[in-house]
């Protein structure tokens, strides 16, 4: 029996590291290992009678449960269809994983192993991203060859120049944090390989990625690095010189293309053409603000954004222009990208569904995360969570949300002595 217990503990130690390893590789594997981690932590809490330690000693964890509780309560008055209600609850339940992951990490003290596995997995994806970008191999054949691994890859990922297995948003966010993490440990351990990987990830995001969220995030993390991590003026000069040099090469073409595309998207909005990511976000923001004004206290209930955007498009007679054809909201989510339950902003999403009560709870969540920053890594985690929530429905999104709760669990009140 003692040997069995020791074996189970050894397995438990590797559950969260494996989830971190698969973040950019496999959605199914990440979900599998993360759910096992949460279940393991839940059993540990029962075994050690530690629920009081989770709920009584830290208000932050109470807020996590409060936010999900508000989603559950709102299901009693939501205007959403039952399938949308259930789907949204399944999305937001990951918020209450945080206390259990925190307890798991506190019990097994395997923070360094989680980070090590994340670095290995992300490095593998970084290499594949460069391979894909420069067409060293035929990636379409590669995706066909790995079908036996049950790694789902949609057409958007196949067509994107640098995304490998996850969409450009989650890959951009994860590699932005990866770049910062490599830089942090490179400085701490004077490791040239980690410096090199950090620069490679930075170049990948700025000059090869298609994610505007990643551009914004890496800019903030880079600025923070210059003040708190990179203290050597020679290294600062080297890094800036490298960026300027790259701007004079063909590497800058992708960045210039994205900037021009952004300008064109804004011009399209002025012409009432919303056939762009910025155009769609503009409409979703308008719907969010309007419905927050209409139902400011309790919101419209969990999963309600789909119905609200559908009604708004019909009322305003807004069409989504696809080539030479116009798509109305009545034709469904599969044909009209404007009709969705994901407004690509957590602030919009929560305010519409839960009103001021939910929005205030989420602000408290972010505030507690911020005031408990006690290391560069915890500050970086707060920046990642804030930027991701501003420009994406961070916790509604499956993989982005899972990545964020792992980061929060790792660095909340953790001084990073690894």
Image (cartoon, helix red, strand yellow):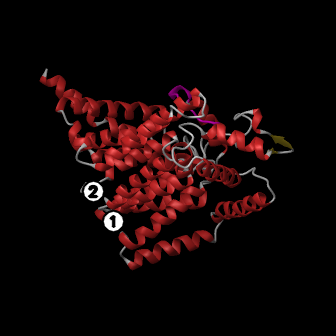
- Tell how many labels: 2
Residue at the image position 52 percent from the left and 29 percent from the top: 86
Against 61, is 364 above or below?
below
**Extreme top residue here?**
1
Residue at the image position 43 percent from the left and 47 percent from the top: 404
The answer to whether residue 161 is left or right of residue 313 is left
Nearer to me, 126 or 174: 174
Q: Quadrant of residue 32?
A: top left
Residue at the image position 62 percent from the left and 36 percent from the top: 154
Region in magenta: 147-154
Residue at disc 1, secondary structure: helix
Using the numbered discs, state the Cα–Cα distance from disc 2 to disc 1 in whole angstroms.
14 Å
**Extreme right residue here?**
324
Residue 352, image x, y percentages: 57, 46
Res. 392 mark: none
Residue at disc 2, secondary structure: loop
Mark 1 residue crowding within 10 angstroms, few (<14) / some (14–19) / many (20+): some
Contact flag, marks 2 and 1 (Cβ < 8 Å) = no
**Extreme left residue here?**
2
Q: Which residue is mark 2?
A: 416
The mark nearer the N terminus, 2 or 1, is 1
The answer to whether residue 55 is left or right of residue 324 is left
Residue at the image position 23 percent from the left and 44 percent from the top: 56
Q: Nearer the viewer, mark 2 or mark 1?
A: 2
Residue 392 in magenta stretch: no
Quarter of the picture holding the C terminus: bottom left
Residue 380, image x, y percentages: 40, 60
Residue 84, visible in the rendered structure: yes
Q: Which residue is mark 1?
A: 187
Mark 2 residue crowding within 10 angstroms, few (<14) / some (14–19) / many (20+): some
The answer to whether residue 13 is left or right of residue 247 is left
Nearer to me, 315 or 105: 315
């Amino acid at each position: 029996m003692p040997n069995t217990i020791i074996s189970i503990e050894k397995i438990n130690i590797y559950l969260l590291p494996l989830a971190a390893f698969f973040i950019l590789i496999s959605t199914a594997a990440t979900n599998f290992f993360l759910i096992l981690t949460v279940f393991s932590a839940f059993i540990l809490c029962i075994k050690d009678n530690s629920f009081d330690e989770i709920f009584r000693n830290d208000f932050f964890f109470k807020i996590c449960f409060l936010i999900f509780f508000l989603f559950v309560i709102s299901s009693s008055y939501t205007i959403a269809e039952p399938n949308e209600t259930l789907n949204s609850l399944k999305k937001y339940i990951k918020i209450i994983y945080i206390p259990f992951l925190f307890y798991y990490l506190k019990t097994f003290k395997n923070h360094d192993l989680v980070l090590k596995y994340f670095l290995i997995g992300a490095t593998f994806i970084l290499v594949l991203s460069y391979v894909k970008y420069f067409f060293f191999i035929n990636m379409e054949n590669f995706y066909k060859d790995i079908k036996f691994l049950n790694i789902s890859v949609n057409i958007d990922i196949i067509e994107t120049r640098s995304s490998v297995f996850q969409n450009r948003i989650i890959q951009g966010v994860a590699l932005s944090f990866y770049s910062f993490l490599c830089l942090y440990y490179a400085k701490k351990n004077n490791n040239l390989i980690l410096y090199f990987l950090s620069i490679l990830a930075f170049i990948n995001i700025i000059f090869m990625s298609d994610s505007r969220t990643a551009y914004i995030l890496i800019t903030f993390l880079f600025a923070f690095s210059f003040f708190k991590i990179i203290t050597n003026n020679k290294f600062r000069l080297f890094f800036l010189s490298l960026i300027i040099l790259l701007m004079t090469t063909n590497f800058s073409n992708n960045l210039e293309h994205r900037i021009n595309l952004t300008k064109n998207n804004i011009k399209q909005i002025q012409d009432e053409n919303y056939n762009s990511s910025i155009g769609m976000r503009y409409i979703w923001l308008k719907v969010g603000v309007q419905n927050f004004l209409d139902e400011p206290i309790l919101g419209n209930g969990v999963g309600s954004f789909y119905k609200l955007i559908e009604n708004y498009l019909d009322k305003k007679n807004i069409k989504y222009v696809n080539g030479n054809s116009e798509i109305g909201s009545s034709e469904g989510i599969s044909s009209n990208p404007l009709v969705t339950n994901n407004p690509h902003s957590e602030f919009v999403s929560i305010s519409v569904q839960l009103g001021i009560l939910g929005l205030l709870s989420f602000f408290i969540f972010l505030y507690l995360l911020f005031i408990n920053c006690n290391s560069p890594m915890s500050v970086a985690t707060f920046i990642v969570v804030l930027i991701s929530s501003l420009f994406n429905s961070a916790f509604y999104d499956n993989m982005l949300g899972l990545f964020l709760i792992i980061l929060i669990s790792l660095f909340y009140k953790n001084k990073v002595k690894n």
